[in-house]
Image (spheres, rainbow, N blue to C red):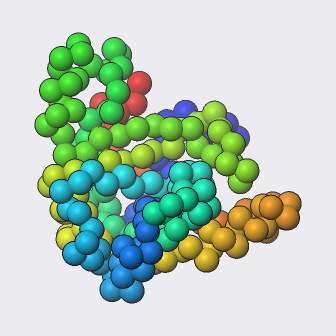
């Protein structure tokens, strides 16, 4: 079945959604151990979260890239996730969505969150035709993410390594069985109109 070009797909429950991030061990390991981000995690910086496990694997090279060796599954409240999306700006100018460049630039400066739609990835990390959400959080959104929205933090680095080894050995069926299942994330009709062309 052909997927819509723009659609949020994620692991989610009635009250939470799981996003992924990759960090150096000195950040990621304490975060997973304590269930919250350590003091060394900079709340003043833009932080990018990804609901797609495979896009995270593409970004961090299956947890092998420098400062990305620890992959975290961060379960956050749906309320917080949807607040960020409602208050987000697209990270690039789209004439069909923005009246003009200056209006978009002003919105981007003021928004506490930003969205990019990047090609989703398959098990070989090749691009797919449909898009995957990347959600950037800054200012109030980053602080709320770390201090209010986070429900749990799990180190999924061993899972990343296991799935990678299965892909390398061409056991794609088992790799697909083990990777997190992500399903369409329903939001109120029209609530993403400012983010999808």
Which residue is painted at 32% across and 33% down in the image? 90
Which residue is painted at 46% across and 37% down in the image? 117
| Residue occupying the far bottom of the picture | 33
Q: Return the x and y of residue 1 as percentages of the image width and height.
A: 70, 41
Q: In the rendered view, does 25 fall on the left or right side of 4?
A: left
Residue 99 falls in image quadrant: top left
Q: Return the x and y of residue 106 as percentages of the image width and height.
A: 15, 26
Q: Is residue 92 above or below residue 182?
A: above
| Residue occupying the far right of the picture | 170
Q: Is residue 170 visible?
A: yes
Which residue is painted at 27% across and 68% down in the image? 41
| Residue occupying the far front of the picture | 66
Q: Is residue 162 above or below residue 6?
A: below
Q: How many marks?
A: 0
Q: In the rendered view, does 189 fall on the left or right side of 73?
A: left
Which residue is painted at 21% across and 32% down in the image? 108
Q: Return the x and y of residue 77 as percentages of the image width and height.
A: 30, 66
């Amino acid at each position: 079945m052909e997927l819509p070009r723009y659609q949020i797909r994620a692991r989610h429950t009635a009250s939470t959604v799981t996003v992924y991030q990759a960090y150096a061990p000195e950040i990621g390991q304490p975060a997973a151990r304590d269930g919250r981000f350590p003091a060394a995690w900079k709340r003043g910086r833009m932080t990018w979260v990804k609901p797609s496990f495979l896009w995270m694997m593409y970004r961090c090279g299956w947890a092998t890239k420098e400062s990305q060796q620890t992959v975290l599954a961060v379960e956050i409240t749906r309320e917080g996730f949807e607040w960020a999306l409602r208050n987000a700006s697209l990270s690039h100018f789209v004439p069909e969505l923005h009246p003009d460049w200056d209006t978009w630039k002003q919105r981007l400066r003021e928004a506490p969150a930003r969205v990019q739609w990047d090609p989703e990835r398959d098990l070989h990390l090749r691009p797919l035709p449909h898009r995957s959400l990347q959600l950037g959080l800054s200012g109030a959104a980053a602080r709320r993410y770390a201090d209010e929205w986070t429900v749990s933090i799990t180190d999924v680095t061993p899972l990343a390594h296991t799935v990678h080894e299965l892909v390398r050995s061409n056991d794609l069926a088992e790799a697909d069985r083990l990777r997190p299942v992500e399903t369409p994330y329903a939001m109120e009709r029209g609530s993403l109109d400012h983010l999808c062309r």
